[in-house]
């Protein structure tokens, strides 16, 4: 599959919303209370547009979309630098029909490369404990670091932090899915 990565623009708001809502619905339906999944694509798109036009990404952050050969946004990632100087995958979502094809791996590796370009080789990601896809990060070499409370629309959950102490293991992976 031919995949193209490019920076996110405000015009991607609807596509980001579609990817995020579809991925959450697929991963969490039947696992979390329905109230956690009541967020619509229209609400999400409005939030993305507002975010990009009013707040914008912090200077240390970046967002990348993954597009199919037909120009359809099929995934995205948001990476950045934390206050302690380490890197973080802040968000990662891939449309359910495209999961398992290496797109998520390609996006994580891209975040690691962007951070490495800044001299950062330590990276974390936070993943809800109930997320059935969290083993994905372990397969990419991340190790469990800690667990902490997470509130999702008033529902308490646990969130796990995974760590790549040295992202060179990601940089040595093939770039294409």
Image (cartoon, rainbow, N blue to C red):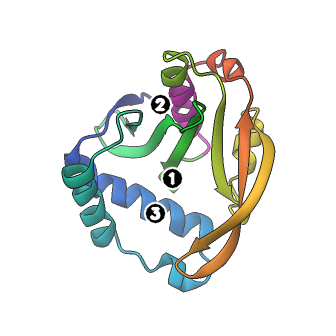
Residue with the mark numbered 3? 22
Local crowd size for mark 3, using a 10 Å CA cut-off: few (<14), some (14–19), many (≥20): some
Q: Is residue 39 above or below residue 71?
A: below
**Foreground: disc 1 or disc 3:** 3
In the rendered structure, does residue 109 fall within the stretch colored magenta?
yes
Picture coordinates of residue 149, whole percent (x, y): 70, 67
Q: Nearer the viewer, residue 175 or 49?
A: 49
Q: Position of residue 66 (x, y in %)?
A: 40, 37
Which of 38 and 73 lies nearest the eye of the viewer?
A: 38
Q: Position of residue 85 (x, y in %)?
A: 57, 30
Q: Magenta part of the protein: which range?
A: 100-112
Residue under circle 1? 97
Label 1 and label 3: CA atoms lie apart by: 10 Å
Question: In the figure, residue 2 lies in which quadrant?
Answer: top left
Q: Tag 2 or tag 3, which sits nearer the N-term?
A: 2
Q: Is residue 31 magenta?
A: no
Q: Earlier along the polypeptide chain: callout 2 or callout 1?
A: 2
The residue tagged with tag 2: helix, strand or loop? loop
């Amino acid at each position: 599959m031919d995949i193209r990565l490019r920076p996110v623009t405000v015009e991607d708001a609807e596509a980001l919303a579609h990817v995020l809502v579809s991925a959450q619905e697929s991963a969490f339906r039947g696992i979390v209370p329905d109230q956690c999944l009541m967020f619509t694509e229209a609400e999400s798109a409005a939030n993305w547009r507002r975010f990009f036009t009013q707040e914008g990404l912090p200077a240390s952050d970046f967002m990348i979309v993954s597009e199919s050969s037909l120009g359809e946004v099929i995934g995205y990632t948001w990476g950045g630098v934390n206050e302690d100087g380490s890197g973080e995958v802040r968000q990662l979502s891939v449309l359910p029909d495209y999961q398992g094809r290496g797109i998520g791996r390609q996006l994580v590796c891209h975040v690691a490369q962007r951070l490495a370009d800044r001299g950062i080789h330590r990276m974390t990601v936070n993943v809800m404990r109930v997320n059935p896809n969290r083993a994905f990060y372990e397969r990419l070499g991340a190790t469990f670091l800690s667990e902490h409370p997470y509130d999702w629309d008033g529902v308490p959950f646990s969130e796990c932090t995974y760590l790549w102490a040295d992202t060179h293991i990601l940089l040595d992976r093939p770039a294409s899915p």
